Amino acid sequence: MSFDDEEYAALPEDRRWARKHRAIVDAAATLFLERGYLGTSMDDLATLARISKQTIYKHFGDKESLFIEMVTTIVDEISDPVHEEVLALQDTGDVEADLRDLARRQLAGVMTPRLLALRRLVIGEAGRFPELGRAFYERGPGRTIASLAATFERLGARGELIADDYATAAAHFNWLVMSAAINRAMLLGPGTSWGDLDQQADDGVRAFLAVYGLPD
Amino acid sequence: MSFDDEEYAALPEDRRWARKHRAIVDAAATLFLERGYLGTSMDDLATLARISKQTIYKHFGDKESLFIEMVTTIVDEISDPVHEEVLALQDTGDVEADLRDLARRQLAGVMTPRLLALRRLVIGEAGRFPELGRAFYERGPGRTIASLAATFERLGARGELIADDYATAAAHFNWLVMSAAINRAMLLGPGTSWGDLDQQADDGVRAFLAVYGLPD
């Protein structure tokens, strides 16, 4: 991407800003994930994004706001399609097959190296900068569990699931599918093997349906 | 604790070393948790523990080995009684009541502020220093899940639980009970409310028994 060619100059204002925004967020992701939050300066960000520091400050405010924008962007890339799939599940004709499909995609999404690195970073900084972790939680697991709860309640009303408390059912689904792999990845670090993810997703769905599915 | 009084001088060699060992590990816990791994120097550790740097190097090797010894000590303090309780469960007369008791203790243990801070620290460093997280994983969740699997297999042989795969059953028990609280605590940071922990433990046990318990 370049900000000084003729093609760029010919773009309308909002398209030009969208490109710059993307360049800044990409640079932020690269530097924050490589050097940590404290190890990244706005000067380095401006240099890497090839955009003036004034422009960055003007549009993002301070470093914390830029970090939160970066978290939001990366987490949404994974979380948006999951969210859509959770909503689509309300009209499913085959709960088991569609839950299994959702679980596999959801687990594959959270186990992408970039999202794992970001999760490690915000957890490591959660003591000093709780807003960073909060942004991750609310856009990621918090949002997914809330939409799962709403979808499960609809499926319950249609007689396809049975639960006293759909928020608990949603948390159980989410963590049955994802916890073993996420916790291994968090503690054992990049490059570790975490086993067959599809198998873990399927085992989680099987357990979930044994609790909250209809009796055979 | 003091290393220059008469009482200390009168102790046998192994008791004297045990006291110094404890002082070094306590100082390591204080400094590593406060300043992070890279932010802690062996000089600061020696000053806080009031023990010469030579003695620390002689007994622990390098900073990474001392960190791993500190992780092992803190994690074992929580993990040892859980491990005992998991083994005792093999002879239980009331699976449901004893699982509930285990789950509540286990969750209360992992949610102590010091263990949460340590977990945040090793996750934050897992990219650069995977050995730190590995020590935490192997002494903590890895060990608990392995002993749960052995106990569940014994209970299965006695006809008190039903599972095709006891390692998966053990992982499901562990994460049904602990994931929601741990993941909130990791991302949302210290001082956040994570709800009624006993209730979350009970909900996890109820779900676990719906999957792996005997039919009513």
Image (tube, coloured by chain):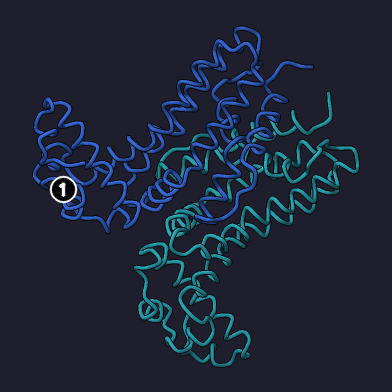
Chain colours: A blue, B cyan
Q: Nearer the viewer, residue B215 or A147?
A: A147
Q: Chain of mark 1?
A: A
Task: Choose top left, top right, bottom left or bottom right for residue A105.
Answer: top right
Q: Which residue is mark 1?
A: A50
Q: In the displayed image of the protein, which residue is found farthest to the top?
A: A158
Residue, x 68% and y 39% (percent of image)? B172
In this view, A70 is above or below B23: above
Secondary structure beneath dot 1 equals loop
Q: Nearer the viewer, residue B74 or A181?
A: A181
Q: In the displayed image of the protein, which residue is found farthest to the front?
A: A6
Q: In the displayed image of the protein, which residue is found farthest to the right?
A: B158
Report the side of B185 relative to A42 (left or right). Answer: right
In this view, A172 is above or below B115: above
In this view, B197 is above or below A85: below
Residue, x 48% and y 89% (percent of image)? B5
In this view, B195 is above or below A214: below
Q: Position of residue A151 (x, y in %)?
A: 53, 16
Amino acid under label 1? Arg
Label 1 Cα neighbours within 10 Å, binned few <14 / some 14-19 / many ≥20: some
Task: Choose top left, top right, bottom left or bottom right for residue B170.
Answer: top right
Residue, x 30% and y 40% (percent of image)? A70
Q: Position of residue B147 (x, y in %)?
A: 74, 53
